Amino acid sequence: MSTQPKLAVWKFASCDGCQLSLLDCEDEILAVSDAVQIANFAEATRHVEPGPYDLSLVEGSITTPHDAERIREVRAQSRHLITIGACATAGGIQALRNYRDVSEMASVVYASPQYIDTLATSTPVSDHVKVDFELRGCPINKHQLLEVILAFLHRRKPVVSSESVCVECKLRGNICVMTAHGTPCLGPVTHAGCGAICPAYNRGCYGCFGPKETPNTAALAAQWKTLGASSGEILRAFRSFNGYADAFREESLKHE
């Protein structure tokens, strides 16, 4: 019997992109597999070892009554539980449903809506169970994920930057798209992790990594207005991948 810590990866409502980020680690995942037993990971293998698990990685939001019941079961058999990606940490793009009447939408989309068993909202895992760490991103940064896994294996705090995308722009040598071109950009209020990909190509940040710590969204929205952005454009910008994260949701409501 293996004495290695057991790692499990779970999927809820999501696109699988964050799980693919783990598989994309390639050589690094071989090193991880030497340190842990990958006991439950449907994206990678059909073999399943029974719990309990030392570390569970959870991708996806909670959108159905079955999801809500299953996440409690996952939590019960997990020593540590880490949520990965925008869906698991903020409800994901599917949380746009939270601003509409889900029953009405189901009646429009489905020929037999009475067979649809869903919750009225799409919510992060932390709304339902205790979460030990949240790793943001759409998708997550694979290097940050490896750092978090290693940190929990060695019982230390993960070293994940809490800076904004603006810091990554400076480190990359990017010219600020808002200052130089008047392009609206969520970088000042967005958590670092992407390497400032969009600003590097003269595009504004879309907020894929969610709100940074203590983001000044009101000041950014006011600056956007001086650039000519309408209230509707600001609302839509804050309601994307991480639109149901507290800071982004609260700012978007100001522009309805």
Image: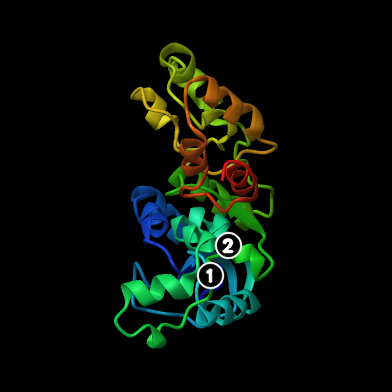
Q: Give the residue displayed 46% in from the left and 49% down from the top.
A: 241
Residue carrying label 1 = 62
Taking the spot 36% from the left edge, 56% from the top edge, the residue there is: 20
In this rendering, does residue 85 appear at all?
no
**Label of residue 124 in the image:** 2
Label 1 CA crowd tier, 10 Å (few <14, some 14–19, many 20+) = many
Residue 128: image quadrant is bottom right
In front of the other: 11 or 99 = 99
Identity, as a three-letter code, of the amino acid under mark 1: Ile
Q: Position of residue 109 (x, y in %)?
A: 32, 72
When the figure is inspected, residue 237 is found, relative to residue 200, above or below; the finding is below
Observer-nearest of 111 and 46: 111
Residue at far top of view: 180
**Contact (Cβ within 8 Å) of mark 1 with mark 2:** yes
Q: Amino acid at mark 2?
A: Pro
207 left or right of 198 in image: right
Lower sequence index among marks 1 and 2: 1
The residue lying at 52 percent from left, 49 percent from top is 242
* Residue 161, picture quadrant: top right
- Give residue 11's position: percent from left, percent from top: 45, 69
Q: Position of residue 118 (x, y in %)?
A: 48, 78
Helix, strand or loop under label 2: loop
Vertical order, 3 against 199 (above or below): below
Q: Is residue 144 above or below residue 96?
A: above
Reply above or below: 14 against 195: below
